[in-house]
Image (cartoon, grey):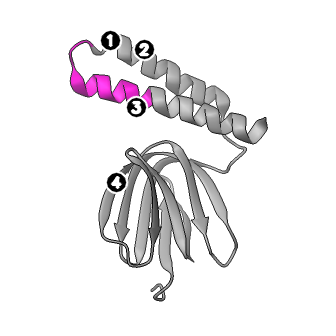
Amino acid sequence: MADQGKLQVRLVTPDRILLDEEVTSVEVPSKGGYLEVMAGASPVLARIGAGMLKLHGGESGEKSFVISRGIAEVLPQRVTILANTVEKPGRVDTAAAQEIEVRGQQQWEQAGDDAAAFQESNDLIMEGQTLMELAKQRHG
């Protein structure tokens, strides 16, 4: 269990647990914007958008991961992040990011009056664009 000034963070993908560590804070890219969480935070359940997950104050130093799609559960002493995709910075697959954006544009063209399909297509377009931008920042 985390001590009073620490927060237990668990990063999980569909395949495995990638990280389970104590930190002083974590920045999570939610659909509504970045959340910075510290020990004692109020409970929150947030949808994850594409972006950079940053862990601060851990024993192994600062860590960053590019993540997209999923959910974050924030509790006072623990954050669990269930992410569809996780990559280390500099390892973002630009071809895959472009494919996500193209798929989103195709779905947008077919969405018609279906609000859920329209939202899903916009989410895919934003995800692809964000991943491409993160790839450029790390390579350029």
- Name the quadrant containing residue 108: top left
The amino acid beneath tag 2 is Gln
For marks 2 and 3, give the one nearer the viewer: 3
Q: Is residue 14 above or below residue 132?
A: below
Residue 18 in picture, x, y percent from top left: 56, 62
Pointer 4: what residue? 46
State the extent of the magenta-drawn residues as a range: 112-124
Residue 43 in picture, x, y percent from top left: 30, 68
The amino acid beneath tag 3 is Asp
Callout 3: SS: helix
Counting the numbered discs, the total is: 4
For marks 2 and 4, give the one nearer the viewer: 4
Pointer 3: what residue? 123
Residue 88 in picture, x, y percent from top left: 66, 51
The amino acid beneath tag 4 is Ala
Crowding at dot 4, Cα within 10 Å, few <14 / some 14-19 / many 20+, comes out as: some
For marks 3 and 1, give the one nearer the viewer: 3
Do labels 1 and 2 touch, CB within 8 Å?
yes
Q: Please tell me which residue is depicted at 56% across the width and 66% down the height of the picture.
A: 19
Crowding at dot 1, Cα within 10 Å, few <14 / some 14-19 / many 20+, comes out as: few
Callout 4: SS: strand
Q: CA distance from mark 1 to mark 2?
A: 7 Å
Callout 2: SS: helix
Q: CA distance from mark 3 to mark 1?
A: 15 Å
Do labels 2 and 4 touch, CB within 8 Å?
no
The amino acid beneath tag 1 is Gln
Q: CA distance from mark 3 to mark 4?
A: 15 Å
The one nearer the camera, 87 or 62, is: 62
Pointer 1: what residue? 110
Pointer 2: what residue? 106
